[in-house]
Image (cartoon, helix red, strand yellow):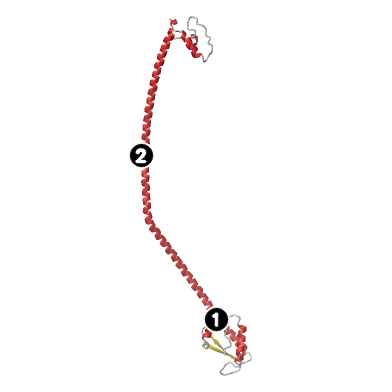
């Protein structure tokens, strides 16, 4: 008769005592403890395993309140049950410790596996990043193969443009210099012509003035009174009245103001 199935975990002490008591009752003071064939399982998995392998136990432990051995039927002291309970508790504690250690070992192993997996993942990520950098460097080097000739062409083109611009500036400077020389020559020629014209004009004006003065002198010589009239006309806008003493020697009345007239017949 199967009384109960128990899984080693916390909180089964009361159920274990009830099951042992019930088994001793129906077993007339004796019970058989069947340990599972595969240890290390816990929870529902262990219970399902025992259900599938019912009757196939690794070992059987016989407990009895009447005898210590089912073969010899030797009676034991009354406190046998308490001792057996302590033994059972010790056995269960040992089994629980075993399961706990196995679980810890599994956890440690899982942690190691996770750490190893993370390490491998980081190494692969680092390798992938390094490979990407290598590919990027190769692509950049390949691009530089095409960029450098293009840059050289640009530099050559700029040098040619600079040389052409230099030649153009030189030619413009030469043309400007030649233009300034031509302008300076033209200006000098123009000034020379203007000077010649001015000299000619002054010469002509001088001749005209000389001829005019000669004519006026001849007229004044013939008509001395014209000097007074001319003087009055010249000074009419400056003075209103001119008072001059008469000459004592019969000379020109304005002689004291304007001086003696050269070539005056009165001098002889």
Depth check, front residue: 204 or 153: 204
Depth check, front residue: 227 or 75: 227
Is residue 193 in view? yes
Q: Is residue 110 above or below residue 254?
A: below
- Name the quadrant containing residue 98: bottom right
Q: Is residue 17 above or below residue 168?
A: below
Q: Label 2 belongs to which residue?
A: 171
Quadrant (top left, top right, bottom left, bottom right) of the N terminus: bottom right
- Name the quadrant containing residue 130: bottom left
Residue 227 screen position, x and y as percent: 47, 10
Question: In this image, 20 relative to 149: left or right?
Answer: right
Residue 58 screen position, x and y as percent: 52, 87
Q: Residue at horizontal 49%, vertical 13%?
A: 233
Q: Label 1 belongs to which residue?
A: 44
Q: Earlier in the sequence, mark 1 or mark 2?
A: 1
Q: Residue at horizontal 38%, vertical 27%?
A: 190
Q: CA distance from mark 1 to mark 2?
A: 104 Å
Disc 1, SS? helix
Q: Residue at horizontal 43%, vertical 6%?
A: 265
Disc 2, SS? helix
> Would you call the spot at circle 1 few (<14 residues within 10 Å), some (14-19), or many (20 or more)?
few
Q: Is residue 256 above or below residue 70?
A: above
> Would you call the spot at circle 2 few (<14 residues within 10 Å), some (14-19), or many (20 or more)?
few
* Label pair 1/2, CB-CB below 8 angstroms: no
Query: Number of callouts in the render?
Result: 2
Quadrant (top left, top right, bottom left, bottom right) of the C terminus: top left
Residue 10 screen position, x and y as percent: 59, 80
């Amino acid at each position: 008769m199967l009384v109960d199935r128990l899984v080693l975990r916390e909180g089964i002490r009361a159920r274990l005592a009830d099951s042992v008591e019930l088994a001793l009752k129906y077993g007339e003071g004796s019970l058989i403890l069947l340990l599972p064939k595969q240890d290390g399982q816990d929870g529902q998995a262990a219970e399902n395993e025992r259900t599938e392998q019912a009757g196939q136990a690794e070992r059987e432990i016989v407990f009895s309140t009447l005898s210590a051995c089912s073969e010899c039927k030797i009676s034991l002291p009354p406190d046998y049950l308490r001792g057996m309970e302590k033994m059972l508790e010790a056995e269960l504690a040992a089994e629980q410790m075993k399961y706990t250690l196995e679980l810890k070992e599994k956890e440690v192993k899982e942690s190691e596996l996770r750490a190893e997996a993370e390490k491998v993942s980081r190494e692969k990520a680092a390798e992938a990043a390094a490979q990407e950098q290598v590919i990027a460097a190769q692509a950049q080097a390949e691009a530089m193969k095409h960029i450098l000739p293009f840059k050289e062409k640009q530099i050559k083109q700029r040098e040619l443009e600079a040389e052409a611009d230099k030649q153009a500036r030189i030619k413009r400077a030469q043309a400007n210099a030649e233009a300034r020389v031509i302008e300076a020559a033209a200006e000098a020629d123009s000034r020379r012509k203007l000077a010649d014209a001015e000299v000619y004009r002054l010469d002509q004006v001088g001749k005209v003035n000389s001829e005019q003065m000669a004519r006026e002198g001849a007229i004044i010589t013939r008509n001395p009174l014209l000097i007074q009239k001319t003087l009055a006309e010249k000074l009419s806008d400056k003075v209103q009245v001119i008072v001059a003493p008469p000459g004592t020697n019969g000379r020109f009345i304005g002689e004291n103001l304007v001086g003696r007239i050269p070539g005056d017949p009165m001098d002889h």
